[in-house]
Image (cartoon, rainbow, N blue to C red):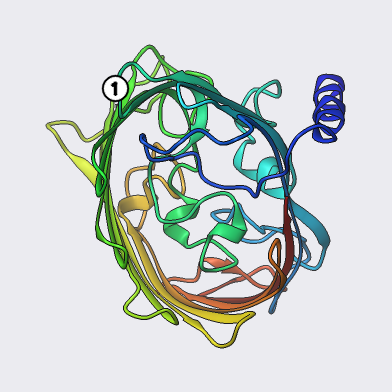
Amino acid sequence: MKHFLTLGLLFTAASAALAQAPVATDTVAATSPAPANPLTFYGFVDGYYGYDFRHPNTTTRPAFLYSHNRQNEFTVNQGLVGLRYDNGQVRGAIGLQAGSYVAANYAAEDPVFKHLYEAYAGFRPFQKAWLDVGIFSSHIGFESAISKDNWTLTRSVMAENSPYYEAGARFTYEVAPTLTLTGLVLNGWQNIRENNQAKAVGTQLQWKPTDKLLLNSSTFFGNEQPQDSVRRRRYFHDFYLSYAPTTQLSLALVFDVGKQENEQGAGRADTWHTGAALVRYKLAEKWSATARAEYYRADRGVIINSSMPRMGDAAFKVHGASLTLDYAPARNVLFRVEGRVLQAPNPIFPRPDGTPAPSYGNLTSSIALAF
Protein backbone atom coordinates (compact mmCIF):
# COMPACT_ATOMS: atom_id res chain seq x y z
CA MET A 1 0.00 0.00 0.00
CA LYS A 2 2.94 2.32 0.72
CA HIS A 3 4.23 1.80 -2.83
CA PHE A 4 0.73 2.27 -4.24
CA LEU A 5 0.32 5.64 -2.50
CA THR A 6 3.79 6.77 -3.56
CA LEU A 7 3.10 6.03 -7.22
CA GLY A 8 -0.28 7.74 -6.94
CA LEU A 9 1.36 10.93 -5.65
CA LEU A 10 3.86 10.83 -8.52
CA PHE A 11 1.01 10.56 -11.04
CA THR A 12 -0.80 13.46 -9.41
CA ALA A 13 2.29 15.64 -9.55
CA ALA A 14 2.92 14.74 -13.17
CA SER A 15 -0.59 15.70 -14.23
CA ALA A 16 0.11 19.42 -13.75
CA ALA A 17 2.56 19.32 -16.66
CA LEU A 18 0.65 16.99 -18.97
CA ALA A 19 -2.22 17.48 -21.37
CA GLN A 20 -5.28 15.65 -20.17
CA ALA A 21 -6.81 12.90 -22.32
CA PRO A 22 -9.94 10.79 -21.88
CA VAL A 23 -9.61 7.12 -20.99
CA ALA A 24 -9.60 4.95 -24.09
CA THR A 25 -8.71 1.41 -25.05
CA ASP A 26 -5.09 0.75 -25.99
CA THR A 27 -5.86 -0.79 -29.37
CA VAL A 28 -4.69 2.02 -31.67
CA ALA A 29 -4.47 1.64 -35.42
CA ALA A 30 -0.89 0.88 -36.35
CA THR A 31 -0.71 3.75 -38.84
CA SER A 32 -2.20 6.38 -36.51
CA PRO A 33 0.00 9.47 -36.22
CA ALA A 34 1.80 10.06 -32.93
CA PRO A 35 0.03 12.56 -30.65
CA ALA A 36 1.44 16.07 -30.30
CA ASN A 37 2.37 15.23 -26.71
CA PRO A 38 3.50 11.58 -26.54
CA LEU A 39 3.05 11.48 -22.75
CA THR A 40 -0.53 11.71 -21.45
CA PHE A 41 -2.13 11.44 -18.03
CA TYR A 42 -5.54 9.82 -17.61
CA GLY A 43 -7.96 9.02 -14.82
CA PHE A 44 -11.34 7.45 -14.21
CA VAL A 45 -13.63 7.04 -11.21
CA ASP A 46 -16.96 5.20 -11.03
CA GLY A 47 -18.96 5.75 -7.85
CA TYR A 48 -22.16 3.73 -7.45
CA TYR A 49 -25.03 2.57 -5.26
CA GLY A 50 -26.92 -0.67 -5.84
CA TYR A 51 -29.95 -2.26 -4.27
CA ASP A 52 -30.97 -5.94 -4.51
CA PHE A 53 -34.61 -6.95 -4.10
CA ARG A 54 -35.31 -9.60 -1.45
CA HIS A 55 -31.62 -9.63 -0.56
CA PRO A 56 -30.14 -11.67 2.29
CA ASN A 57 -28.43 -9.98 5.25
CA THR A 58 -25.30 -9.10 3.31
CA THR A 59 -23.90 -6.28 1.18
CA THR A 60 -22.47 -8.63 -1.47
CA ARG A 61 -24.21 -9.65 -4.67
CA PRO A 62 -24.12 -13.20 -6.14
CA ALA A 63 -20.58 -14.59 -6.24
CA PHE A 64 -20.39 -14.76 -10.05
CA LEU A 65 -20.76 -10.94 -10.32
CA TYR A 66 -17.52 -8.95 -9.89
CA SER A 67 -18.27 -5.44 -11.18
CA HIS A 68 -20.67 -3.27 -9.14
CA ASN A 69 -20.90 -6.27 -6.82
CA ARG A 70 -21.98 -4.45 -3.63
CA GLN A 71 -25.58 -3.70 -2.67
CA ASN A 72 -27.09 -1.19 -0.24
CA GLU A 73 -23.70 0.49 0.00
CA PHE A 74 -22.26 3.69 -1.47
CA THR A 75 -18.85 2.75 -2.83
CA VAL A 76 -16.44 2.97 -5.78
CA ASN A 77 -16.39 0.28 -8.42
CA GLN A 78 -13.10 1.48 -9.90
CA GLY A 79 -10.79 4.42 -9.32
CA LEU A 80 -7.98 4.63 -11.85
CA VAL A 81 -5.01 6.91 -12.60
CA GLY A 82 -2.28 6.30 -15.12
CA LEU A 83 0.28 7.47 -17.64
CA ARG A 84 0.61 6.50 -21.30
CA TYR A 85 3.46 7.15 -23.70
CA ASP A 86 3.30 6.83 -27.50
CA ASN A 87 5.63 8.60 -29.93
CA GLY A 88 4.57 6.52 -32.92
CA GLN A 89 7.50 4.09 -32.63
CA VAL A 90 7.62 3.29 -28.91
CA ARG A 91 4.70 3.05 -26.48
CA GLY A 92 3.92 1.98 -22.94
CA ALA A 93 1.54 2.53 -20.05
CA ILE A 94 1.17 2.14 -16.32
CA GLY A 95 -2.12 2.53 -14.47
CA LEU A 96 -3.06 2.06 -10.81
CA GLN A 97 -6.55 1.11 -9.64
CA ALA A 98 -8.63 0.40 -6.54
CA GLY A 99 -12.30 -0.26 -5.81
CA SER A 100 -14.84 -3.01 -5.21
CA TYR A 101 -14.24 -4.43 -8.72
CA VAL A 102 -10.53 -4.75 -7.95
CA ALA A 103 -11.15 -6.36 -4.57
CA ALA A 104 -13.45 -8.98 -6.12
CA ASN A 105 -11.88 -9.70 -9.51
CA TYR A 106 -8.23 -9.63 -8.41
CA ALA A 107 -8.74 -11.54 -5.15
CA ALA A 108 -6.48 -14.41 -6.28
CA GLU A 109 -3.64 -12.15 -7.47
CA ASP A 110 -0.47 -11.27 -5.61
CA PRO A 111 -1.04 -8.06 -3.56
CA VAL A 112 1.93 -6.47 -5.34
CA PHE A 113 0.18 -6.78 -8.72
CA LYS A 114 -3.57 -6.55 -7.97
CA HIS A 115 -3.65 -2.73 -8.12
CA LEU A 116 -2.12 -2.63 -11.62
CA TYR A 117 -4.77 -1.91 -14.23
CA GLU A 118 -2.13 -1.96 -16.98
CA ALA A 119 1.68 -1.98 -17.14
CA TYR A 120 3.28 -2.72 -20.48
CA ALA A 121 6.02 -1.57 -22.85
CA GLY A 122 6.09 -1.94 -26.63
CA PHE A 123 7.69 -0.92 -29.91
CA ARG A 124 7.19 -1.29 -33.64
CA PRO A 125 9.22 -4.24 -35.00
CA PHE A 126 8.20 -3.02 -38.47
CA GLN A 127 5.65 -0.69 -40.04
CA LYS A 128 1.98 -1.36 -39.14
CA ALA A 129 2.92 -3.69 -36.25
CA TRP A 130 3.29 -3.43 -32.46
CA LEU A 131 4.90 -5.80 -29.98
CA ASP A 132 3.88 -5.23 -26.33
CA VAL A 133 4.90 -7.11 -23.18
CA GLY A 134 3.33 -6.74 -19.73
CA ILE A 135 -0.19 -6.45 -18.31
CA PHE A 136 -2.97 -5.17 -20.56
CA SER A 137 -6.71 -5.38 -21.20
CA SER A 138 -8.12 -8.70 -22.38
CA HIS A 139 -8.49 -9.42 -26.08
CA ILE A 140 -11.72 -11.28 -25.26
CA GLY A 141 -15.21 -9.83 -25.08
CA PHE A 142 -17.46 -6.94 -26.05
CA GLU A 143 -17.25 -5.38 -22.56
CA SER A 144 -14.28 -3.93 -20.66
CA ALA A 145 -13.40 -3.06 -17.08
CA ILE A 146 -14.06 0.65 -17.77
CA SER A 147 -17.81 1.01 -17.22
CA LYS A 148 -18.29 4.16 -19.29
CA ASP A 149 -17.06 2.33 -22.41
CA ASN A 150 -19.80 -0.31 -22.09
CA TRP A 151 -23.32 0.01 -23.41
CA THR A 152 -24.78 -1.18 -20.09
CA LEU A 153 -23.88 -0.21 -16.54
CA THR A 154 -23.48 -3.74 -15.13
CA ARG A 155 -21.61 -6.42 -17.03
CA SER A 156 -23.24 -9.45 -18.61
CA VAL A 157 -22.73 -12.83 -16.90
CA MET A 158 -20.51 -13.84 -19.83
CA ALA A 159 -18.25 -10.80 -19.40
CA GLU A 160 -17.99 -11.31 -15.64
CA ASN A 161 -16.74 -14.86 -16.16
CA SER A 162 -14.23 -14.31 -18.95
CA PRO A 163 -10.94 -12.36 -18.71
CA TYR A 164 -10.89 -8.60 -18.11
CA TYR A 165 -7.08 -8.48 -18.11
CA GLU A 166 -4.09 -10.53 -19.28
CA ALA A 167 -0.32 -10.75 -18.76
CA GLY A 168 2.00 -11.78 -21.56
CA ALA A 169 3.23 -10.73 -25.00
CA ARG A 170 0.95 -9.22 -27.64
CA PHE A 171 1.72 -8.82 -31.36
CA THR A 172 -0.67 -6.60 -33.34
CA TYR A 173 -0.57 -6.18 -37.11
CA GLU A 174 -2.73 -3.96 -39.28
CA VAL A 175 -3.28 -5.97 -42.45
CA ALA A 176 -5.41 -3.19 -43.92
CA PRO A 177 -7.23 -0.11 -42.60
CA THR A 178 -10.29 -2.34 -42.08
CA LEU A 179 -8.56 -5.49 -40.74
CA THR A 180 -6.35 -5.97 -37.65
CA LEU A 181 -4.84 -9.25 -36.44
CA THR A 182 -3.44 -9.93 -32.96
CA GLY A 183 -1.53 -12.93 -31.59
CA LEU A 184 -0.81 -13.43 -27.88
CA VAL A 185 1.26 -15.65 -25.58
CA LEU A 186 -0.13 -15.41 -22.05
CA ASN A 187 0.45 -16.58 -18.49
CA GLY A 188 -3.10 -17.86 -18.55
CA TRP A 189 -6.81 -17.11 -18.29
CA GLN A 190 -6.84 -13.79 -16.41
CA ASN A 191 -3.60 -14.57 -14.55
CA ILE A 192 -0.93 -12.00 -13.78
CA ARG A 193 1.18 -14.50 -11.86
CA GLU A 194 1.72 -17.87 -13.54
CA ASN A 195 0.11 -20.85 -11.77
CA ASN A 196 1.87 -23.61 -13.76
CA GLN A 197 4.68 -24.08 -16.28
CA ALA A 198 2.36 -24.00 -19.31
CA LYS A 199 1.67 -20.93 -21.40
CA ALA A 200 -1.60 -20.04 -23.10
CA VAL A 201 -2.05 -18.62 -26.60
CA GLY A 202 -4.72 -16.39 -28.05
CA THR A 203 -5.74 -14.69 -31.27
CA GLN A 204 -7.96 -11.78 -32.24
CA LEU A 205 -9.31 -10.69 -35.60
CA GLN A 206 -11.16 -7.39 -35.96
CA TRP A 207 -12.75 -6.50 -39.28
CA LYS A 208 -14.53 -3.21 -39.90
CA PRO A 209 -15.74 -3.28 -43.52
CA THR A 210 -17.73 -0.06 -43.03
CA ASP A 211 -17.99 2.68 -40.42
CA LYS A 212 -21.25 1.09 -39.28
CA LEU A 213 -20.19 -2.55 -38.88
CA LEU A 214 -17.53 -4.23 -36.70
CA LEU A 215 -16.91 -7.98 -36.44
CA ASN A 216 -14.61 -9.56 -33.83
CA SER A 217 -13.32 -13.12 -33.40
CA SER A 218 -11.12 -13.97 -30.38
CA THR A 219 -9.73 -17.34 -29.28
CA PHE A 220 -7.92 -18.79 -26.24
CA PHE A 221 -6.16 -22.13 -25.71
CA GLY A 222 -4.24 -23.21 -22.61
CA ASN A 223 -3.89 -25.45 -19.56
CA GLU A 224 -5.44 -23.63 -16.63
CA GLN A 225 -4.88 -26.09 -13.78
CA PRO A 226 -2.35 -25.52 -10.96
CA GLN A 227 1.09 -27.08 -11.32
CA ASP A 228 0.30 -30.08 -9.11
CA SER A 229 -3.02 -30.86 -10.85
CA VAL A 230 -3.89 -33.04 -13.82
CA ARG A 231 -3.41 -31.23 -17.13
CA ARG A 232 -6.78 -30.03 -18.45
CA ARG A 233 -6.78 -28.00 -21.61
CA ARG A 234 -9.22 -25.14 -22.16
CA TYR A 235 -10.50 -24.04 -25.56
CA PHE A 236 -12.52 -20.85 -25.99
CA HIS A 237 -13.94 -18.68 -28.77
CA ASP A 238 -15.58 -15.26 -28.46
CA PHE A 239 -17.50 -13.66 -31.32
CA TYR A 240 -19.34 -10.37 -31.48
CA LEU A 241 -20.59 -7.88 -34.01
CA SER A 242 -21.84 -4.34 -33.62
CA TYR A 243 -23.89 -2.48 -36.20
CA ALA A 244 -25.11 1.12 -36.26
CA PRO A 245 -27.74 1.46 -39.01
CA THR A 246 -28.45 5.09 -38.00
CA THR A 247 -26.85 7.75 -35.83
CA GLN A 248 -29.46 7.01 -33.16
CA LEU A 249 -29.65 3.20 -33.22
CA SER A 250 -26.89 0.66 -32.46
CA LEU A 251 -27.14 -3.14 -32.26
CA ALA A 252 -24.78 -5.81 -30.94
CA LEU A 253 -24.75 -9.61 -30.82
CA VAL A 254 -22.26 -11.57 -28.68
CA PHE A 255 -21.69 -15.33 -28.47
CA ASP A 256 -19.05 -17.29 -26.51
CA VAL A 257 -18.36 -21.01 -26.44
CA GLY A 258 -15.72 -22.86 -24.40
CA LYS A 259 -14.63 -26.41 -23.61
CA GLN A 260 -12.41 -27.75 -20.82
CA GLU A 261 -11.18 -31.31 -20.35
CA ASN A 262 -12.44 -32.91 -17.15
CA GLU A 263 -11.44 -35.70 -14.79
CA GLN A 264 -13.53 -38.33 -16.58
CA GLY A 265 -10.65 -38.94 -19.01
CA ALA A 266 -10.70 -40.20 -22.60
CA GLY A 267 -11.01 -36.69 -23.97
CA ARG A 268 -14.17 -35.90 -21.98
CA ALA A 269 -14.84 -32.19 -21.60
CA ASP A 270 -17.26 -29.77 -19.98
CA THR A 271 -18.74 -27.14 -22.28
CA TRP A 272 -20.14 -23.69 -21.62
CA HIS A 273 -21.84 -21.31 -24.03
CA THR A 274 -23.38 -17.91 -23.57
CA GLY A 275 -24.92 -15.15 -25.62
CA ALA A 276 -26.30 -11.63 -25.45
CA ALA A 277 -28.19 -9.18 -27.66
CA LEU A 278 -28.06 -5.43 -27.05
CA VAL A 279 -30.00 -2.51 -28.51
CA ARG A 280 -28.90 1.06 -27.79
CA TYR A 281 -30.97 4.08 -28.79
CA LYS A 282 -30.10 7.76 -28.51
CA LEU A 283 -33.19 9.44 -27.05
CA ALA A 284 -31.85 13.01 -27.16
CA GLU A 285 -28.56 14.88 -27.28
CA LYS A 286 -27.57 13.87 -23.74
CA TRP A 287 -29.83 10.85 -23.20
CA SER A 288 -29.66 7.24 -24.36
CA ALA A 289 -31.05 3.84 -23.35
CA THR A 290 -29.80 0.27 -23.79
CA ALA A 291 -31.79 -2.96 -23.52
CA ARG A 292 -29.97 -6.27 -23.03
CA ALA A 293 -31.09 -9.91 -23.15
CA GLU A 294 -28.62 -12.64 -22.15
CA TYR A 295 -28.20 -16.28 -21.22
CA TYR A 296 -25.43 -18.46 -19.75
CA ARG A 297 -25.11 -22.25 -19.58
CA ALA A 298 -22.14 -24.20 -18.16
CA ASP A 299 -21.84 -27.98 -17.74
CA ARG A 300 -21.38 -28.77 -14.04
CA GLY A 301 -20.71 -25.06 -13.43
CA VAL A 302 -17.36 -25.19 -15.25
CA ILE A 303 -15.62 -21.77 -15.14
CA ILE A 304 -18.44 -19.96 -13.35
CA ASN A 305 -18.41 -22.00 -10.12
CA SER A 306 -14.95 -23.51 -10.20
CA SER A 307 -12.21 -24.35 -12.69
CA MET A 308 -12.46 -27.93 -11.37
CA PRO A 309 -16.19 -28.75 -10.94
CA ARG A 310 -17.21 -31.83 -8.98
CA MET A 311 -18.58 -35.00 -10.54
CA GLY A 312 -22.37 -34.98 -10.51
CA ASP A 313 -22.75 -31.20 -10.21
CA ALA A 314 -25.75 -29.83 -12.10
CA ALA A 315 -25.31 -27.48 -15.03
CA PHE A 316 -25.38 -23.76 -14.27
CA LYS A 317 -28.15 -22.09 -16.29
CA VAL A 318 -29.36 -18.53 -16.11
CA HIS A 319 -31.01 -16.00 -18.42
CA GLY A 320 -31.93 -12.40 -17.86
CA ALA A 321 -32.61 -8.89 -19.11
CA SER A 322 -31.68 -5.34 -18.19
CA LEU A 323 -32.49 -1.75 -19.14
CA THR A 324 -29.91 1.04 -18.74
CA LEU A 325 -30.71 4.76 -18.92
CA ASP A 326 -27.76 7.12 -19.53
CA TYR A 327 -27.49 10.88 -19.03
CA ALA A 328 -24.30 12.74 -20.02
CA PRO A 329 -24.43 16.27 -18.55
CA ALA A 330 -20.90 16.94 -19.77
CA ARG A 331 -18.46 15.33 -22.21
CA ASN A 332 -16.55 13.46 -19.51
CA VAL A 333 -19.35 12.69 -17.03
CA LEU A 334 -21.92 9.92 -17.27
CA PHE A 335 -24.86 9.28 -14.92
CA ARG A 336 -26.48 5.85 -15.28
CA VAL A 337 -29.42 3.94 -13.78
CA GLU A 338 -30.07 0.29 -14.55
CA GLY A 339 -32.68 -2.30 -13.62
CA ARG A 340 -31.79 -5.98 -14.03
CA VAL A 341 -33.44 -9.38 -13.56
CA LEU A 342 -31.93 -12.88 -13.73
CA GLN A 343 -33.84 -16.15 -13.81
CA ALA A 344 -32.62 -19.73 -13.35
CA PRO A 345 -34.41 -23.10 -13.64
CA ASN A 346 -32.91 -24.11 -10.30
CA PRO A 347 -32.98 -22.04 -7.06
CA ILE A 348 -29.48 -20.55 -6.96
CA PHE A 349 -30.06 -17.03 -5.60
CA PRO A 350 -30.12 -16.52 -1.80
CA ARG A 351 -33.18 -14.98 -0.11
CA PRO A 352 -33.53 -13.10 3.20
CA ASP A 353 -34.50 -16.29 5.06
CA GLY A 354 -31.43 -18.12 3.76
CA THR A 355 -33.25 -20.40 1.34
CA PRO A 356 -32.44 -20.19 -2.39
CA ALA A 357 -34.75 -18.75 -5.05
CA PRO A 358 -34.79 -19.11 -8.86
CA SER A 359 -34.97 -15.35 -9.56
CA TYR A 360 -32.93 -12.26 -8.75
CA GLY A 361 -33.41 -8.54 -9.37
CA ASN A 362 -31.51 -5.34 -8.66
CA LEU A 363 -31.22 -1.62 -9.32
CA THR A 364 -27.84 0.08 -9.78
CA SER A 365 -26.95 3.75 -10.22
CA SER A 366 -23.57 5.26 -11.04
CA ILE A 367 -21.78 8.53 -11.75
CA ALA A 368 -18.57 8.10 -13.73
CA LEU A 369 -15.94 10.75 -14.44
CA ALA A 370 -13.12 10.38 -16.97
CA PHE A 371 -10.24 12.79 -17.47
Q: Residue furthest front?
A: 36
Q: In the image, is 334 to the left or to the right of 317?
A: right
Residue 212 at x, y = what percent? 31, 68
x and y, in percent, of residue 220 in the image: 29, 36
Residue labelled with disc 1 = 231
Q: Nearer the viewer, residue 122 or 237?
A: 122
Residue at x 41% of width, y 38% of height: 32
- The answer to whether any part of residue 328 appears in the image is yes
Q: Is residue 197 above or below residue 30?
A: above
Classify residue 188 as left or right of residue 283: left
**In the image as oriented, which residue stretches furthest toward the bottom?**
283
Q: Nearer the viewer, residue 187 or 228?
A: 187
Residue 363, how many percent across, how many down? 67, 76
Please say if 298 is above or below 109.
below
Quadrant position of residue 96: top right
In the rendering, at what x and y percent does residue 346 appear?
43, 71
Please state which amino acid type lies under the numbered disc 1: Arg
In this picture, residue 244 sits left or right of residue 101:
left
- Relative to 55, does residue 304 appear above or below in the rendering? above
Q: Residues within 10 Å of mark 1 (few under 14, many from 20)?
A: some
Q: Secondary structure at mark 1?
A: loop
Q: Residue at x 34, y 19 (%)?
A: 199
Tell me what residue is drawn at x 47 percent, y 55 percent: 143
Q: Is residue 180 toward the left or the right of residue 150 in the image?
A: left
Q: Which one is in front, 309 or 365? A: 365
* Image quarter (top left, top right, bottom left or bottom right) of the N terminus: top right
